[in-house]
Amino acid sequence: MKKSIFRAVTDERVLIIIAGIAFLWRAVVSSDEKITFCESVCSGVSLFIIGWVLFAYMYSMSRKPTDWPATNRIYRGIAFSLLVLNIYIAIYYGLRWYGLLRVEISVPRDFIYRDLRYVIFVMYYCIAIGSARYLKGMEENYRLLIKERPKKRAQNIKEAIFRLMTHKLTLAAIIAVAILWRLAITIDNNVTFWESTLSGISLIIMGWFLFGYLFALSVKVKHKQDLTKAIQSVALGLGVINVYAIFYYGMRWYGLITQIMGEVTETYVSQPLELVFRDMRYVMLVLFYCTTILLTKHLVTAYDDYTVPARKE
């Protein structure tokens, strides 16, 4: 029964239905261009349940003994990515429910952005749920025959750059720079168009470059089905978050440009806590991309060690 439930939950058709329900739900609650407190609570609680249950499952699987340690690291990488997004969602709905966060982009376009964010996060969770089937296939059907791989130097510049970019110290430096950058541009309680542009472009470059690398890796391992599907799931989930970043900054830039040109006069003045939340959003997205970079490192290791065990007679 446990296996049957797992197969049903991770079935692509079930996940498509869940994403469709999320889309219809937000279409209904925002049809009057107003989202009530109860509607917001229903949306937030549904994301909490899916996100934290999925995180608990991925983390528990990362602690499970296996003949192939790479799968534990992949589970752990996905769990950390989920943790970052879950914390972001918890902070967002906490501020929203306490009335500390009212407007994120602009008054007329804010409800559209909130609807898209909800649907995108549900889609990401569905993709992560679907990846569990392929990860389980990797764990059950394959094992690592070489227990210790000797350390070797990078053979070319491409490999050396990959090792440098996926090093923990490099990722820690990226996160520190992101925090300092946001502190510097919001110290005067105002984010200009060019400051917002630099923030958005940095995220877009990081996100889509990583997406391209994962897509190329999935093509490279096309003869290893479970691993290929797992990599494609990670890439697809990353692509969904990239679309979220593009949509947010696209709407943000459009609003700032119309204000600069004098076509639209924004009467609402952002509160200091709302500016802090923008900083937090940027840092959380950088954290998400850094955890995905670490996950990519483990996927590459799995590709190198992906070995089919001999069948037992």
Image (cartoon, rainbow, N blue to C red):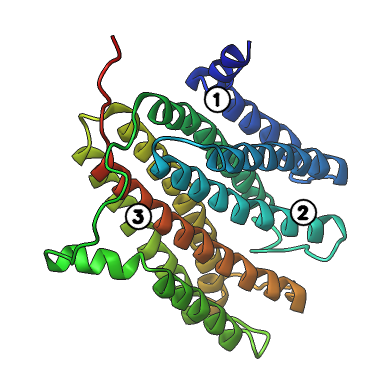
Task: Please name the amino acid that badge 2 sits on.
Answer: Tyr
Query: Horizontal and vertical percent for residue 219?
Result: 21, 38
Q: Residue at x 64, y 64 (%)?
A: 105
Which label is found at residue 297?
3
Task: Please name the amino acid that badge 3 sits on.
Answer: Lys
- Of tags 3 and 2, the one toward the viewer is 3
Q: Report the residue that reaches farthest toward the left.
A: 156
Helix, strand or loop under label 3: helix
In the picture provided, is 220 more to the left or to the right than 248?
A: left
Task: Please name the amino acid that badge 1 sits on.
Answer: Leu
Q: Quadrant of residue 51?
A: top right
Along the viewing direction, whichever of 128 and 182 lies nearer the viewer = 128
Marks 2 and 1 sit apart, C-alpha to C-alpha, by: 24 Å
Which label is found at residue 93?
2
Q: Quadrant of residue 272?
A: bottom right
Which label is found at residue 15?
1
Helix, strand or loop under label 1: helix
Query: Horizontal and vertical percent for residue 118?
Result: 64, 44
Marks 3 and 1 sit apart, C-alpha to C-alpha, by: 27 Å
Q: Residue at x 49, y 50 (%)?
A: 77
